[in-house]
Image (cartoon, helix red, strand yellow):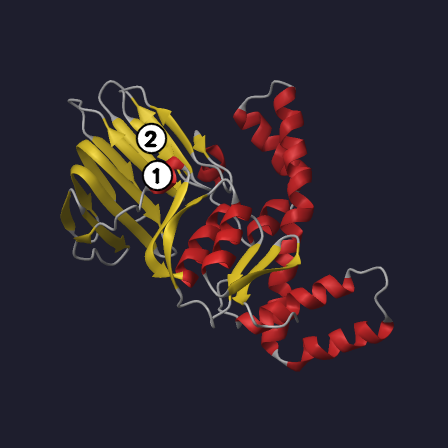
Amino acid sequence: MSQSIDFTVLEQAAEWFSRLRDEHVSEQDRLAWQLWLEAQPQHRQAWQRVEMISSQFERLPQRQAARSALQARGMDRRQALKVLSVISGGALLALTGRGLPWQQWQANQRTAVGEVRGSELADGSRLWLNTDSALDVDFSASLRRLALYRGEVLVDVAADDRPLWLETEHARLRVQQGRFAVRQREDGYLVSAERGELEILGARRQALVAGQQIYFDALRVDQPAPLRPGQQAWTHGILQADDIPLGEFIAELSRYQHGHLGCDPQVANLRLVGAFPLAEPERIYSALEASLPVRVVRRLPWWISIEPRETAAV
């Protein structure tokens, strides 16, 4: 569900969800919830969002257990995926609210939500995959090819007679040597060059040199812009905030966590500076409460909101 839902309505939906799951919920509460649900179309949309996120946590352990069992039997990746799809039934759709391209499940490099992993390729290049990413690596005597299906990748390309090609849904990137990153956005891709230069073959041909970044989608390739400092700190397990709005920081942090992580619009424009350890979210929350006039509210184990400090609990 990509439709924007008011923050307050989402919080009300999460509060109702928590209340109705209480074993002591009364019939009066159920009737009040029904009245709330029918009061506005956005109430129902918010409720569906909360239910969808809840279903991820109910189904995910079952799916992980099934995958572990299949791998324990010695099945290869293709066999395990085939059997897992039968075991899971509609679970894959429920996990994301939509179907995922089959290539993402077959990709030979993948990371889970919250996982950041580095590896060395056959040519000596280094590769880092960010959270919730899927990538294929295809090297041969005449070819160096990467295909990004989902998420974000950073590549430190070793010198080689063969150019390295990185394919996305909307364009191909050609690199001989250098260090660059590609991040999938909702409708396109952000490419940044830290070292060396690359060429984008998309809606139009565009060169990118060190210290620049560029956005492209199916219809356009923007003009290059300066690379933001600390943008690739995630490769070291750090989320860096260089005087950015809190709302932007929380949206970025949410990529590394299961469940819902929201920011009240009342505090979304507060500025934030610092370097935060991605592996320790509780330290991040404590730092936010210590440095900004905000508090961290947990309406459910998987529903966390950043709100003004003086706001009373719903």
Q: Quadrant of residue 7?
A: bottom right
| Residue for point 51% across, 64% down | 294
Do callouts 1 and 2 mark residues in contact (Cβ within 8 Å)?
A: yes
State the image coordinates of residue 157 (x, y, percent, origin top left): 23, 29
Mark number displayed over residue 153: 1
189 left or right, relative to 257: left
- Which of 123 and 82 lies nearest the eye of the viewer? 123
Q: Secondary structure at mark 2?
A: strand
| Residue for point 49% across, 67% down | 3
Task: Establish if 303 lies above or below 163.
Answer: below
Q: Rounded to the nearest whole Å, what is the CA distance between mark 1 and mark 2?
A: 7 Å
| Residue for point 59% across, 21% down | 75
Q: Earlier in the sequence, mark 1 or mark 2?
A: 2
| Residue for point 17% across, 45% down | 211
Camera sees residue 226: yes
Q: Residues within 10 Å of mark 2 (few under 14, many from 20)?
A: many
54 left or right, relative to 274: right
Mark number displayed over residue 127: 2
Q: Amino acid at mark 1?
A: Val
- How many circles with numbers are drawn on the protein? 2
- Which residue occupies the extreme front position in the image? 290
Camera sees residue 257: no
